[in-house]
Amino acid sequence: MSPTNSLKNSSAPEERQIDALPDSTSWLARVHPYFKDPRHVLLLKLDTLLLSWAFVAGLFKDMDQSATTAAYVSGMKEDLGLFGNELVEFTTWFSVGYALFIVPSQLIQTRVRPSVFLPFCEIVWGLFTLFTYKAQSAKTIYVLRFFLGVFESTSWPGIVSLILNWYTPKELGKRLAIFGVSGVAGNMFLGIVQAALYKNLNGAHGLAGWQWLFIVSGIMTIFWGLVGFLVIPDSPSITRALYLTEQERELSRARMDDSGTKTSSIIPFKVLVEKLKLLVKTPITYLYLAGYLQFAWSQRANSYFLLYLKGLTDSNGDSLYSVYTVNLIPLGGYGISIVCNIGLNALSDWKGWRWQVAVAVAALQVLATSVLAGWPDSRQTIMAFYFLTFATAAWGYALLAWMAEILRKEPEVRSILVGTAVTLVYAGHASIPLRAWRVADSPRYPIGFPLAAAFAVGSIISILGLRFYVDKHPDIVEWGLDQEGAKSRAVEEIIPSDRSAASDDVKEPAQQTVRV
C-alpha cells in the first residue's frame, strides 16, 4: 500500500479511540467509578472551569451590551431628554466599534495568549460600562458605547475559539449552545437586576435606578475579568493552566488529534498570511457567511420587544404595564430560547444534525417574522409570535459546530472566519436598524419584519448551498483547505520513517552474521 493510501485510511474524519488509559489518580476516582477514566476527569475540569467562566463572561457581555436599552425604558430617556432616535444610535456606535475591532482582535490572539488578552479586555470594557452612569448627554454615551464595542469585540469570537480548541466535534454542539445561551441569560439577569434596582435603589445616594444598573454591571464584569487570568487555558498545544496536570495536558492534545482536529498555537506572521489567503479563496467562506449573517440580521426582529411593551396602553391611554413589569415580561422569551437552544444542539450532537437543525430553525423564523410583518389585530397573537422568535436562537451554534467540523484541520481559519462573521453581523447591526428598525416605525416596523423574513429565507438557501459544496469536496474535512500541501507534508513524514525501517531490516541480518 502506498504511503498516501495508508494515510487516507488512517486519517478518516470520524473520531478514533484513544488507547486504553491507566485509571485516574484524581480524588474524584475514589468518589465515583465514572471518574476512573482520566478523560472524564479532564472533561469535568473543562466544563467546571473553562465552560463556566465562558458562560458567565458571555452573560456579563450581553448584560453590559443591552444595559442601555434596559436603562432607556427605566428612566434614562426622560432624565437625559432622549426623545429622538438616540436608542438606535447607541446600538450603531457600539456596533461600529465592535465591527472594526473583531478581526484585529482575532489576529492578535494568534500572536498573544488569549489567557492574557481576553481578561484584560473584559476589565477595560467593565470600566466603560461603569462610567456610563455619569453620562449627562447622548454624545457622551455615543463615545462610551463605541469603546465598549471595541473591547467587547474580543469576547464572543475569542471564547468560541477556545471552545473549538478544547472539545471534540461530538462534544461541540451542546457546549457551544450552553455558552450561547449565556447571552439570553444575560438579558434575563439584566431584566431581573434592573427591575430590582429600579424598585429598591431608585433615588439612593442621589442616583436613579438606571444609573445603579451601570454601576453594578461594571463592577461584576471587572471582577470576572480578573478571574479569567486564572481560568483561561489557551489551547492544548500551548496551555499552561494550573488546574491541568501534565498528563491531562497530554491527554487534551491526544483527544483533539484523535478526533482529527488541529488546535491553535502561536504562529509566525508568514503562516498567518497563508491562512488568510486560504480563507479568501475557498467558497466555504462565502457560503458560511451568507448563511450566518442573514439569519443573525433576521434575529433583530425581537430586539425591540421592550419598546413594544413600553408603548402598550389601555383604553384610558395609560401605560398597560409598569416599568417593573416591562423588564420582567421578556423573561419568558429568554426561557424559551435557553430550552430550545440547549435541547436542539444536544440533539445535533447526538444525531449529527448540524445543517438540519439550522435550516429547521430558520424556517421557524420565516413563519414568525412573516406573521409579525402582517401585524395582526390581536395583541395576544403578536405577543405569541414575538415569543416564537426567541425559540430560533439554536440555529447559530448548530451552524458554528458544523463549520468547525468542516474546517477541523484549519484552526486559524476557523478563528478568523468566526471573527469575520461577527464583524459583518455588527456592521449590519450598525446600519440596517437605522432604516429598518427606526424608533419612529415602532411597533409595526413595516420594513423590519418583512426584511427579517427575507433574510431567514436567504439563510436557508445559503446553508443548503454549503451542504452541496461540502458533499462535492469531502477531502476538505480530511486534509484541510490546502489539500495538496497537507498530503505532501504527510507523505514526507512517512517516507523517512519507511526508509529508516528498511535500513534497519538490511542491517539486522549483517548483525546476526557477525554474532554467528
Image: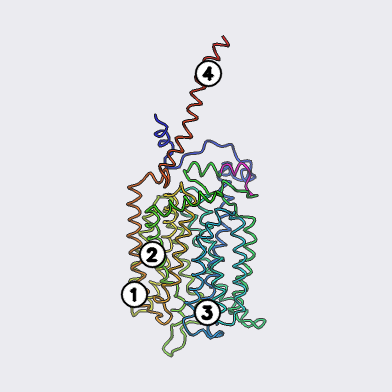
Dividing the picture into quadrants, the one containing residue 24 is: top right
Q: Earlier in the sequence, mark 1 or mark 2?
A: 2
Kindly identify which residue carries mark 2.
294
Q: Earlier in the sequence, mark 4 or mark 2?
A: 2
> Where residue 337 sits in the image (x, y, percent)?
45, 65
> Where residue 267 sits in the image (x, y, percent)?
54, 49
Going by the numbered disc 1, the residue's amino acid type is Ala
Foreground mark, 4 or 2? 4
Q: Camera-side residue: 118 or 48?
A: 118
The region drawn magenta spans: 243-251
Q: Residue furthest bottom?
A: 316
Going by the numbered disc 4, the residue's amino acid type is Lys
Going by the numbered disc 2, the residue's amino acid type is Gln
Dividing the picture into quadrants, the one containing residue 78 is: bottom right
Q: Report the residue at 50% width, 48% height from top.
A: 271
**Residue 127 bears which disc, if any?**
none
> Where residue 45 sits in the image (x, y, percent)?
59, 50
Disc 1 crowd rating (10 Å Cα; few below 14, some 14-19, many 20+) is some
Q: CA distance from mark 4 to mark 1?
A: 80 Å
Above or below, comparing residue 258 to residue 338 in the picture: above
Foreground mark, 2 or 3? 2
Q: Determine whether, in the image, residue 211 is placed left or right of residue 99.
A: right
Foreground mark, 1 or 2? 2
Q: Residue furthest top?
A: 516
Q: Earlier in the sequence, mark 1 or mark 3?
A: 3
Above or below, comparing residue 123 to residue 446 in the picture: above
Kindly identify which residue carries mark 3.
72
The C terminus lies in which quarter of the figure? Answer: top right
